[in-house]
């Protein structure tokens, strides 16, 4: 074997061994990078240089701001208002509370950008509410955790910013606009599945639709929804950058949470900021370590080799796209979302582009694949959170989630093979 091949085996082999041994992901990335650099005979001084280079980015500053905005709004008393808004819109349907759960996740996801926050916040309210109304507890949990993935697609999502940085040259504004229709498609797919199961189990439906009540609930929720509007319109319209819009959104979220909704006092604000720091420490160290890891991948020509290998299996774009989805789904089962985006994007994006996938469309595919991974053992963080919130055994929640996995895969395949689902809105608004 050539020295390059040996170094590649050291890098990827040690990384996946540590992943399966349940090492913290940052340690797995960092240690495998060090071992690879040693096998290549590189000076380890390069490691901190690459780490600093990885986080030395103006666009990445949007990530801590969006996370802070999501935490402030998520703890600032908006959950009840968004649930009431969703109830006024779809609560009249058979399985109405399941539909409310899904639509509320679409609204809340546009504010938090986090599937975990969505599950913890909305789940703690809606799961007990659904159980009290006669819904099965495992079904209620399954609806909650799967619908939370809408928040990964609906802007502003900090994962989109991470992807844009990893992909290089991809517009954050285009990614933001691209997420709306796939997020809505996922919501519709989950609602269809929920309706079929609700009819089968004769779950109840709520009061009849009232236009006046819907307008009233919009009025109560408008301050929360405006936060998303500020970010998306500002970025797409070129008024300010994603980073600037995120900073403005943080200030706006603080004012709304403290002075308008009054869900937070100043003590609560400090606790929220502590939570943000905990999250950011994890995210930023991952970004730094992944930059050094990615540098090793580039030096070893792994992206080019991966592209050659995948395309050698089949020249059919359909087969290659299916293979990309399978690879991402498998990675999602064993890794967290941010490291998948940081590590897999430089490797798989060239392959995706070689079969005609637009980088924006591939970004949506990747995020949804990672979202499905958050719901699958052994590393499914959202699955664990949902089980803990509902106080249900994980195995039973997984069993109840099986029909919803099917709904999510159908949505994923549609997004993968119909480019306009992701690209129509960015092109319409001039973001692409």
Image (spheres, rainbow, N blue to C red):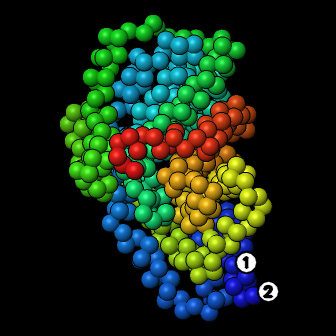
Residue 199, quarter of the rendered image:
top right
Secondary element at image label 1: helix
Dot 2 crowding, Cα within 10 Å, few <14, some 14–19, many 20+: few
Mark 2, residue position: 1
What residue is shown at x 56% (from left), y 74% (from top)?
293
Q: Are marks 1 and 2 in contact (CB under 8 Å)?
A: yes
Return the x and y of residue 313 as percentages of the image width and height.
78, 61
Residue 282: which numbered mark, if any? none
Dot 1 crowding, Cα within 10 Å, few <14, some 14–19, many 20+: few
Return the x and y of residue 432 as percentages of the image width and height.
40, 50
Residue 9: which numbered mark, if any? 1
- Which mark is nearer the camera, 1 or 2? 2
Q: Is residue 169 left or right of residue 295?
A: left
Q: Is residue 292 left or right of residue 235?
A: right
Secondary element at image label 2: loop
What residue is shown at x 47% (from left), y 44% (from top)?
423
Picture layout, residue 406 above or below residue 14 = above
Which circle's residue, 1 or 2, is located before the other in the chain?
Answer: 2
What residue is shown at x 76% (from left), y 65% (from top)?
312
């Amino acid at each position: 074997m050539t020295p390059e091949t040996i170094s590649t085996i050291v890098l990827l082999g040690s990384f996946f061994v540590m992943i399966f041994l349940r090492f913290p992901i940052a340690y797995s990335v960092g240690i495998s990078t060090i071992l690879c650099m040693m096998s290549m005979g590189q000076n380890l001084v390069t490691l901190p240089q690459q780490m600093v280079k990885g986080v030395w980015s103006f666009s990445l500053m949007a990530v801590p701001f969006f996370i802070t905005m999501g935490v402030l709004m998520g703890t600032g008393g908006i959950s009840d208002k968004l649930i009431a808004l969703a109830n006024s819109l779809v609560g009249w349907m058979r399985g109405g509370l399941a539909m409310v759960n899904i639509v509320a996740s679409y609204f809340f996801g546009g504010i938090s950008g986090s599937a975990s926050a969505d599950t913890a916040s909305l789940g703690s309210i809606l799961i007990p509410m659904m159980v009290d109304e006669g819904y099965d507890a495992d079904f209620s949990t399954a609806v909650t955790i799967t619908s939370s993935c809408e928040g990964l697609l609906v802007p502003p999502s900090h994962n989109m910013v991470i992807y844009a940085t990893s992909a290089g040259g991809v517009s954050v504004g285009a990614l933001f606009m691209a997420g709306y229709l796939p997020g809505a498609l996922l919501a519709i797919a989950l609602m269809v599945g929920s309706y079929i199961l609700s009819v089968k189990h004769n779950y109840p439906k709520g009061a009849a639709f009232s236009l006046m009540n819907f307008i009233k609930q919009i009025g109560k929720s408008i301050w929360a929804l405006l936060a998303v509007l500020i970010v998306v319109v500002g970025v797409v319209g070129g008024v300010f950058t994603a980073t600037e819009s995120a900073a403005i959104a943080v200030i706006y979220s603080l004012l709304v949470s403290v002075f308008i909704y009054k869900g937070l006092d100043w003590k609560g604000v400090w606790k929220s900021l502590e939570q943000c720091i905990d999250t950011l420490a994890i995210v930023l160290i991952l970004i730094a370590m992944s930059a050094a890891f990615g540098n090793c991948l580039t030096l070893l020509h792994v992206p080019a080799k991966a592209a050659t290998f995948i395309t050698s299996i089949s020249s059919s774009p359909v087969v290659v796209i299916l293979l990309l989805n399978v690879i991402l789904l498998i990675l999602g089962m064993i890794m967290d979302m941010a490291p998948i985006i940081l590590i897999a994007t430089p490797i798989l994006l060239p392959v995706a582009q070689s079969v005609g996938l637009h980088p924006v469309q591939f970004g949506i595919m990747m995020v949804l694949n990672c979202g499905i991974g958050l719901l699958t053992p052994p590393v499914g963080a959202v699955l664990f959170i949902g089980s803990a919130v509902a106080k249900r055994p994980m195995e039973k929640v997984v069993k109840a989630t099986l029909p919803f996995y099917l709904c999510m895969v159908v949505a994923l395949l549609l997004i993968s093979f119909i480019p306009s689902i992701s690209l129509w809105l960015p092109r319409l608004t001039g973001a692409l």
